[in-house]
Image (cartoon, rainbow, N blue to C red):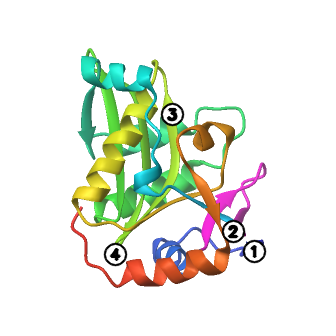
Amino acid sequence: MSYFIPEALDPTLVVQAYAQGIFPMADDEGKINWYAPDPRAILEHRNLHISHSLRATIRKQIYTIRTDTAFEGVMRCCGQREDTWINEEFIKTYTYLHQHGLAHSIEAWQNGKLVGGLYGIALGGAFMGESMFSRARDASKVCLVALTEHLQEHGYVLHDTQFTTPHLITLGVTEIPRRDYERRLRQALQLHCNW
């Protein structure tokens, strides 16, 4: 289900939407549409699938993992693909949310270069993943593992990935009915997790 709201991407509106299980994406013309998919894709922490090769990559510590040191850079890298909803308006709004402690990035660095990462919104005990990118083998997957560990350690109970993709399914992402998602979101928003 999608909703079209012609207003600008106001940060307050964005936060209110996420709290109701709705998120924005821009179309090819830059118009902002709001989505509440049914079913909804989530990653249950216990279901995260770490392949043998990914475990080996993590053990070798090929990448330095950082949090919130290059948020805008992660967004821009995520948006550098043929089909993307991440335009300048999104970068401006989500960077503002980052500066106010609501949007976060996990980053993979190698030899001083940003080679992978992901970002999303954290509200209460819920994390809404937005996008990820990789410019080196397994870099985004290593970030996802680091994010999952971080969410578990800090008491987050809902990890929303919005939609499924073949890539996310291999990592353990599943779908639940929107009604169940909204119930779990309400419960998660009652928590006060520190990032």
How many badges with numbers are in the image?
4
Task: Decide which of 146, 98 is in the foreground and name it.
Answer: 146
Q: Earlier in the sequence, mark 1 or mark 3?
A: 1
Q: Residue at x 43, y 34 (%)?
A: 50
Q: Is residue 25 magenta?
A: yes
Please state the horizontal and vertical placement of residue 165, each as a whole percent of the image: 67, 44
Provide the residue designation for mark 4: 124
Q: Are marks 1 and 2 in contact (CB under 8 Å)?
A: yes
Name the side, left or right, on which 164 lies relative to 173. right
Q: Are marks 1 and 4 in contact (CB under 8 Å)?
A: no
Provide the residue designation for mark 3: 133
Structural crowding at the residue carrying mark 1, measured as other residues with C-alpha within 10 Å and reported as few (<14), some (14–19) or many (≥20): few
Please state the horizontal and vertical placement of residue 6, each as a whole percent of the image: 72, 73
At label 1, the amino acid type is Tyr
Q: CA distance from mark 4 to mark 3?
A: 25 Å
Q: Earlier in the sequence, mark 2 or mark 3?
A: 2
Residue 7 sits in quarter: bottom right
Q: Secondary structure at mark 4?
A: loop
Q: Are marks 1 and 3 in contact (CB under 8 Å)?
A: no
Q: Earlier in the sequence, mark 1 or mark 2?
A: 1
